[in-house]
Amino acid sequence: MKGELTFNVTSNWSEIDHINIRTRDFLSDTSLSKGEVDTFTMVITELMENAIKYGQDDAYIEVAVTITGTDIQIRVDNQIDHNQIPSLKRLDHTLQWIRGIHDPYQAFLERIRQIAREPLSDSKSCLGLVRIAYEGRAIIDFILEENRLSVSAIAILNSSKKTAETSEDA
Amino acid sequence: MTHSVEVFSDGTLKIDKQTSDDEVILNLSGKSIIRDSMDTLLPIFKASLEEAVSADKRLVLDFRPVSYMNSSSFAPVIKVLEKARTGKAHLAVLYNGNEKWQETSFSAMTIFKTVDGRISIDGESDDVRH
């Protein structure tokens, strides 16, 4: 079950498909279920999209994915563009909002309702973070030090939950 | 049913349009990793919705063959569902309920469903229109 993937990519949207393929290939080589492979490919790709949106053009983004026996830890580090500070405030606000709603599904539904109501000009979806929390069941956090942003997502693996349940049953 | 016409392709996502006597159908396939989906996908969805309404047809958005969608790509789906909900359009969104990621994301869109079936969100892997 254990595995580790680290790589650097340039902050360029054209890299997204390669990242999507690369992470899917890595996750598929572990013993994760197809559903988990799809889910965590999404989590990694969404975090990469955010890193590219908020990062300095063509700067390197560092990605680290670690699968332990019980969880998956994803970390994406990059240099941020100073002009994107307002977007980072929205990121912080969204994370606080997600934490305030205990059921990630309700947060996802509420964000869908908000997008439906918003004027087109305001539609910065921010659905990715809510989707990571809901679909990925991941705890998201971020650290901003000077102009370096580190975003992490940690999720318990279903297979480890099943093992724990089986042990308890026995 | 008319021949399929490609209305969008960016190398990863393809959208083909077909029309029948009672439906305008957008078949999406591939991966949607579009950055500015509100500027690219939404105009296609809205134009097709308007075409369907003016011809008194139902618009069908078929996502079943799609293998990946980023979250940004869901925003135009939400927008066109809301536009249909607040108007008189008939709209069906088809997704593959056997794919966990599609079931997880699209089943939440059922908040737009109407009791009269004017707007439907169907998670069937087979063609539910027949």
Image (spheres, rainbow, N blue to C red):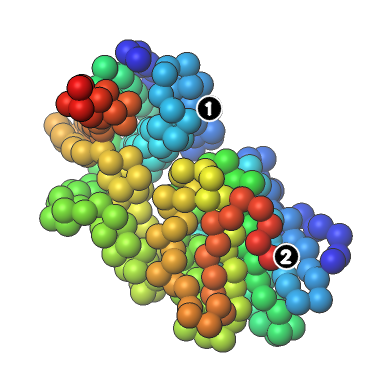
Residue A83 picture location, percent across and down: 28, 47
Quick one: label 1, few (<14), some, or many (20+) residues within 10 Å?
few
Q: Which residue is mark 1?
A: A21
Residue displayed at 67% across by 40% down: B11
Query: Looking at the rendering, which quadrant does residue B17 occupy?
Result: bottom right
* Farthest-out residue, front: A170
Question: Height in image: B9 above or below B119?
Answer: above
Of discs 2 and 1, which sits in the foreground?
2
Q: Is residue A138 visible?
A: yes
Query: Looking at the rendering, which quadrant does residue B22 occupy?
Result: bottom right
Residue B79 picture location, percent across and down: 47, 69
Q: Are marks 2 and 1 on the same chain?
A: no
Contact check, label 2 and label 1, Cβ < 8 Å: no
Q: Amino acid at mark 2?
A: His
Numbered tag placed on residue B99 in the rendering: none
Question: Height in image: B20 above or below A165?
Answer: below
Question: Height in image: A5 above or below A17?
Answer: above
Question: Height in image: A33 above or below A103?
Answer: above
Q: Nearer the viewer, residue A129 or A38?
A: A38
Residue B70 picture location, percent across and down: 46, 46
Residue displayed at 52% across by 65% down: B121
Q: Amino acid at mark 1?
A: Ile
Answer left or right for B46 relative to A13.
right
**Chain for numbered disc 2:** B
Residue B33 picture location, percent across and down: 52, 44
Query: Looking at the rendering, which quadrant does residue A159 occupy?
Result: top left
Q: Nearer the viewer, residue A50 or A73?
A: A73
Residue displayed at 81% across by 57% down: B4
Residue displayed at 42% across by 17% down: A30
Numbered tag placed on residue B130 in the rendering: 2
Q: Label 2, secondary structure: give it.
A: loop
Quick one: label 2, few (<14), some, or many (20+) residues within 10 Å?
few
